[in-house]
Image (tube, rainbow, N blue to C red):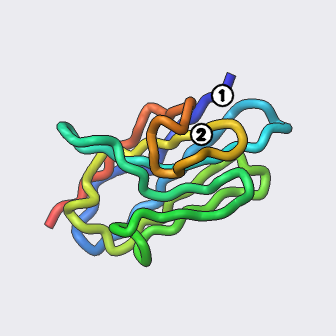
Amino acid sequence: QVQLVESGGGSVQSGGSLRLSCVLSGDPYARYSMAWFRQVPGKEREGVAAFDSDFNINYADSVKGRFTISQDSAQRTLYLQMNSLKPEDTAMYYCAADWGTVGKWNSKYEYVYWGQGTQVTVSS
């Protein structure tokens, strides 16, 4: 049983920073692809950043240069450092994971396990 628990969301002014964390509990010997997604009401869930099981990193164009994804050496805690936040970054942010390598890192259908989400609100 894989569980993901996010934390670190909150409210911040435009230009501010937040750091999200996601703790994964599951098979200690498995390798996972892990990602951050976000969703606003009425819109599709979109990929923000991801690690694949070989530790390659991908970012959405909208966050490149502002967000940094990282994980601890045990691959059990995923982070998203968000700098220079903009009002359009406001969303519910979700951590996602799946076994091994995923085909398309920013497709929500590639990930089986999801956290409960943490709200990020950026005011202008």
- The percent coordinates of residue 117 (x first, y second) are 41, 37
Above or below for 115 versus 67: above
Q: Residue at x 23, y 70 (%)?
A: 14
Above or below for 101 versus 99: below
Q: Which part of the image, by quadrant, shows the N terminus?
A: top right
Above or below for 63 versus 10: below
Q: Are marks 1 and 2 in contact (CB under 8 Å)?
A: yes
- Which residue, as the protein is rendered here, is positioned at the far bottom? 65
Query: How far apart are the two marked residues, 1 and 2, measured between alpha carbons?
Result: 9 Å
| Mark 1 residue type | Val
Q: Secondary structure at mark 2?
A: strand
Q: Residue at x 42, y 47 (%)?
A: 37
Q: Compare residues 7 and 94 and report the one nearer the observer.
A: 94
Side (left or right) of 121 relative to 1 = left
| Mark 2 residue type | Ala
- The percent coordinates of residue 35 (x first, y second) are 54, 49
Mark 2 nearby-residue class (10 Å; few <14, some 14–19, many ≥20): many
- Nearer the observer, disc 1 or disc 2? 2
Q: Which part of the image, by quadrant, shows the C terminus?
A: bottom left
Q: Secondary structure at mark 1?
A: loop
Q: Residue at x 68, y 46 (%)?
A: 101
Q: How many marks?
A: 2
Q: Residue at x 73, y 50 (%)?
A: 75
Side (left or right) of 120 relative to 112 = left
- Which residue, as the protein is rendered here, is positioned at the far left? 124
* Residue on which the image places disc 2: 97
- The percent coordinates of residue 3 (x first, y second) are 61, 29
Q: Quadrant of residue 30?
A: top right
Task: Give the numbered dot on residue 2.
Answer: 1
Mark 1 nearby-residue class (10 Å; few <14, some 14–19, many ≥20): some
